[in-house]
Structures are given as C-alpha cells and as structure tokens.
Amino acid sequence: MKKKKERRSFALFLLPGFTGVCGLVLAPFADVVRRSFVTAVTQEYVGLSNYRRVFANEAFLLAVKNTVRFTAVSLPVLLTLGLLLAMLLSGLANAQIWKSVFLLPMAMPAATVAIVWRMVFAEGGFLNLALGTDIDYMETAGSFWVLVFSYVWKNLGYTVILWLAGIHSVPLDTTEAARVDGAETCRLWRSVILPQTRGSFYTIAVLSFLNTFKAFREAYLVAGAYPQESIYLLSHLFNNWFASLDVDKMAAAAVCMAGVLLIFILLFSALCLREDD
C-alpha cells in the first residue's frame, strides 16, 4: 500500500513536466514530421519528395560537411582543455575565483562578442595590426578556426565546472587509499579519479555536442546569413530557409537532424553503460 502511494505521488510530481514536454516539444515535433511529407502550401502528400530535395540541395550538403567538421574539431578540443583546466583547479585553494572567470564568457551578450571578433579579426583589426596585414579573416578559410576558438572560449566555463563537479564527487577515502598504496599522481588520475568521472564525461560530451549545433549567433552577427563557405553551418541554412519560407524542406531537414542527434546520444549512452558494466 505504501509503495502504491509512493508511485502515485511520484506520478503526480512528474505529471506537470511531462504534460509540458508533450504539449510544447513532442506535439510540435510530430507536426514537423507530418509537414516533412506534405507540401507547404497545399498540404498535399508527396512522400519522400521533400527529403530527396533536401539531400540534392548543395547548400544542405555544404552545411552538413561544415557542421560535421566543426563538431569533430571543436568537441575534442573543448573536452580535453576543460579536463586539463579542471585538473589544475582541483588542487587550488582559490578555485572559486577562477570558476567565476571561466564562466564570464557565458554572461557576455552575443552582440558584444561579435563586436570583439570584428575588432580583432576584421580588416584593419588588431590581428592585422599585429601581423602587418590587411585581411578580413572572416572572409577567408581561417574563419573556421575563428569560429572554433569562439565556441571553445564561450563554452569552456561550464565544461570546467562540470568536470570539477565530477572530480570532487570521487570519494576522498578512495584517493587516499590509492595514495597509501603508492599510486603516483599520474597513476592516481588515470586509474582512480578519471574512471569514476564517466558520468560527468557523458553529461559534458552530450551537452557540448548539442551546443556545436547552436554555434550560430556569433558567426551570423559577424559574417551575416551567407558567411564564408567554411563556416556555413546547418544553423545558417535553417535561418535562410526560414526567411524564404521553405517550410517543407526545413521540416524534412529537421527530422533528419533530430534522427542523427538521437542516434548519437543513444549509441554514446549505450557505450558508457557498457563501459560501466
């Protein structure tokens, strides 16, 4: 009887959130799936025609290639750099001050960041003055690395904080026992601490992966809706299709994108669970 009452209380506790998710997320996405199989104006069923148009679109293929490249480069850099900084901060007494410093970029408005990037990388900017050149780096292939730097700089703060939370969650008794057994610092981190931060690693990796698909505002404000080819991402493509009201193509591309994200998260989750076993 008690367990039944607890289950009822638990269900009532989840009901408001579940209702919100169904009404504001699942139902609209179900409508997007429906729209991916019909025309935008007449709502005529066209089968996979919208998907074929999307995959035949050169802009879509370019955006996918650039987004995959951007994710493959920036994600390992962010995770590795965040871990190294967290390892350094975990041994400092005044780590709280450094946490605030690393979180500062997240509090800066995107417009302010875009102005700074223009001042540094644009024609006549600080980088040109330092190198004695006169190049708009946002209009060259180097703009890709500017975008990678911007993404890492913007998201490094929460990555460090989450890594620190995982490191500090390791029981002190465990690390002390390893030290007593003669484990050196490198061995301690490799064999004791890092294996127990796998949960934090999963959370950080998934959040960072999802955020790579949101690295749009700074690039848009700096270079516009049609930036240099190497930084034309899926976010730019969706923005341009929305502006031209290509709803049917947008719906088909959104379904494909959601499917890829879901498959990645499920595979990554299964991998982490298998490692835990």
Image: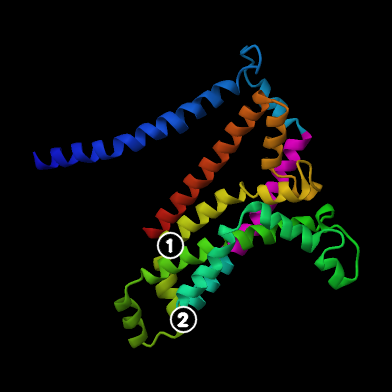
Q: Quadrant of residue 75?
A: bottom right
Q: State whether residue 62 appears in this view.
A: yes
- Residue at label 2? 92
- x then y, percent, for residue 92: 46, 81
Q: Quadrant of residue 180?
A: bottom left
What numbered label is drawn on residue 242? none
Q: Is residue 9 left or right of residue 27?
A: left
Q: Quadrant of residue 274?
A: bottom left
Looking at the picture, does residue 119 appear above or below residue 17?
below
Number of other residues with Cα within 10 Å of mark 2, as a class: few under 14, some 14 to 19, many 20 or more: few
Number of other residues with Cα within 10 Å of mark 1, as a class: few under 14, some 14 to 19, many 20 or more: some
Q: Is residue 183 left or right of residue 146?
A: left
Looking at the picture, does residue 252 appear above or below residue 2?
above
> Which three-letter amino acid code belongs to the residue tagged 1?
Arg
Q: Residue at x 24, y 36 (%)?
A: 12
- Residues 252 and 31: in front is 31
Counting residues from the N terminus, which is met first, the one under dot 2 or under dot 1? 2
Quarter of the image with the C terminus in it = bottom left
Gap in angstroms between the C-alphas marked 2 and 1: 23 Å
What numbered label is drawn on residue 198? 1
Quarter of the image with the N terminus in it = top left
Q: Which residues are magenta?
A: 58-79
